Image: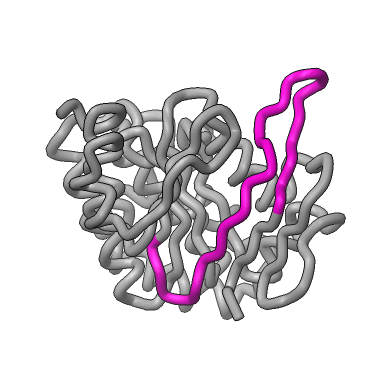
Amino acid sequence: MALLSVKDLHVSYGAIKAVRGISFDIDEGEIVTLIGANGAGKSTTLNTVAGLIKPDSGSVDFEGETLLGLRAHRIVERGLALCPEGRRVFTQMTVAENLEMGGYTRTDAENRETLEKVYDHFPRLKERRGQVAGTLSGGEQQMLAMGRALMSKPRLLMLDEPSMGLAPILVQEIFAIVKQLNEAGTTILLVEQNANMALSVADRAYVLEIGTIKKTGTGAELLVDDDVRKAYLGG
């Protein structure tokens, strides 16, 4: 049984059909990526799985049980966490306070243990734990957003455009951390405009175009696929 199973998902914004009947599965321990142009439906899919958008129809099951109809914080309690596009840290709060917000569904004792693991993954956050989040660099804010999501100790971490707006050297660092998190046992669903980096770390990938899945395969297969290279890899 797949850890996450999305079947025939349809999502609209008024008259605009953003997602048009997509289906995909994620097995425990995988990195799965959704790639595609702006407006393809990638972020809408993640936000629907996270309970932030109500779909028109379809199913979203986690460990064989539906997520549809659950409030977002209940979905977090079930073991899914979303690191949103644009980071959305609490800019007037410290790094430590932001991380504490990520663990609001868990006990203080659980959070103390998880916090140390987050600091192990992101030592820069530990160095800056008393610093106001709005004064961090873009890369540090992305690390903070990821760390905040990890505070709920998710089995499935959804990352929406983690490399957006970052310098190339920081993109490399963020994706190295994504690999480390996966190797430590976290299953990852990744939405990413940097298709080359996303496919390089992904076990499997889905190519979305105008709300539909046009192609699927392993990350390695799609890296050398002619259509994918022409459309998303600049070659």
In this view, the residue farthest toward the top is 15
- Quadrant location, the N terminus: bottom right
Front residue of this view, candidates 134 and 233: 233
Residue 178, quarter of the rendered image: bottom left
From the image, give the main secondary structure of the stretch colored magenta: strand
Give the x, y percent position of residue 217: 36, 56
Q: Is residue 5 magenta?
A: no
Q: Left or right of 101: which side holds 229?
A: left
Residue 79, quarter of the rendered image: bottom right
- Quadrant location, the C terminus: top left
The stretch of residues the image draws in magenta is: 8-31
Give the x, y percent position of residue 36: 42, 33
Residue at image location 51% in from the left, 66% down from the top: 26
Residue at image location 22% in from the left, 35% down from the top: 229
Give the x, y percent position of residue 10: 74, 41
Residue at image location 82% in from the left, 46% down from the top: 57
Give the x, y percent position of residue 54: 80, 42
Front residue of this view, candidates 170 and 218: 218
In this rendering, the answer to whether 98 lies above or below 75 is above
Q: Left or right of 203: which side holds 7?
A: right
In this rendering, the answer to whether 138 lies above or below 175 is above
The answer, for residue 145, to whether it is visible in the render is no
The answer, for residue 38, to whether it is visible in the render is yes
Image mark count? 0
Colour pattern of the rendering: one colour
Residue 177, quarter of the rendered image: bottom left
Q: Left or right of 155: which side holds 49?
A: right
Q: Is residue 28 magenta?
A: yes
In this rendering, the answer to whether 149 lies above or below 17 is below
Front residue of this view, candidates 153 and 79: 79
